[in-house]
Image: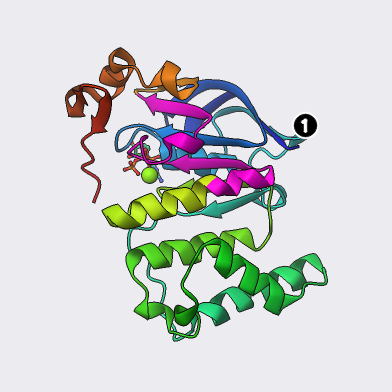
Amino acid sequence: MVSLKLEDLTIGYDKPVVSDIDLELRSPALVQVMGPNGAGKTTLLKTIIGVLKPLKGKIFVNNDDITGDPEKAGRYISYVPQIATYILGNVFPITVREFIEFEAKVYARRTRSRVDVDKVVDEILEIVEIPKELWSKGIDKLSGGQRQRLLIARALIADAPIIAMDEPLSAVDVEGKALLSNTLGKLKERNRIVIITCHDPELLINYTDYIMLIGNNTYVFGKPDEVLQPHILAKFYRSSFIEFEKHIHICDFHL
Ligand SMILES: Nc1ncnc2c1ncn2[C@@H]1O[C@H](COP(=O)(O)OP(=O)(O)OP(=O)(O)O)[C@@H](O)[C@H]1O
Ligand SMILES: [Mg+2]
């Protein structure tokens, strides 16, 4: 079991973006962080992984204080950055398999652990469901959704108990979103805490334990049916929130 505790946390830069966050998560749990563009989703994830110092408060994993310490946070948390069309593959010629193999070797060296690299690489590429025929192809040949899977694969190497992913579904087409949602949802089955920023709560709804809705320097946290209420969503999304009977649709102007 792993726990992540945000205690009296105010995140932001020269001024607060979200203030006074207090919550505790215990594995297994999948949390969707929602909110309009500029609400503070990326800021929250960067603060949790220690690359941004909070303006106030503390972050604990299993009672270990990791606040503002990326090296310590990195022992517990893997991070998948917000990419859209991440530059992967345009930079250096490398195959899918080599990319993950390289990361696994770096991880093994850094942690001085014995890793059966070939086995780990096979397992991870299978978990993220990148088709086998692509493993020997250059990563520049991958689609946006496949690149996203590759970044998720990289984050799985450390087998960290917490995975924070910033909009992993944003660069993926409609069919790919449904498929990748299942892959992401299953990540929590390994007794992990999975934190995902997302614009469409429905995609992962079957796997979602909690929703954190942020915006206007405040937040709401709770079970999906507690948070996904028209009057709450309307407050955070204003005019971009439309309710179609039972289906919730949030206009996503994200590029
Ligand atoms: N490095 C920075 N310095 C100062 N302000 C920043 C910095 N990065 C982001 N901000 C501001 O902090 C607020 C939150 O930004 P953040 O990127 O966390 O939003 P987001 O919810 O991830 O948005 P999006 O949906 O567009 O990804 C915005 O007002 C943004 O302009
Ligand atoms: Mg963001």
Q: Is residue 179 left or right of residue 129?
A: left
Instruction: Please name the residue shown 45% across and 24% down the image.
Output: 224
Q: Position of residue 189 (x, y in %)?
A: 63, 44
Quadrant position of ligand 1 = top left
Instruction: Please name the residue shown 67% across and 35% down the image.
Output: 27
Q: Which residues are magenta?
A: 186-215
Q: Amino acid at mark 1?
A: Asn
Task: Please state which of residues 96 and 235 is positioned toward the viewer in this rendering.
Answer: 96
Task: Return the residue found at the far top.
Answer: 231
Residue highlighted by disc 1: 63
- Circle 1 residues within 10 Å: few <14, some 14–19, many ≥20: few
Task: Please state which of residues 176 and 165 is positioned toward the viewer in this rendering.
Answer: 176
Q: Is residue 142 left or right of residue 126?
A: left
Q: Position of residue 108 (x, y in %)?
A: 75, 71
Please, is residue 73 above or below residue 110 in the view?
above
Instruction: Please name the residue shown 78% across and 72% down the image.
Output: 115
Q: Position of residue 123 (x, y in %)?
A: 64, 68
- Please identify the quadrant where the N terminus is shown: top right
Q: Is residue 7 visible?
A: no
Q: What is the secondary structure assignment of the residue under circle 1?
A: loop
Q: Is residue 249 magenta?
A: no
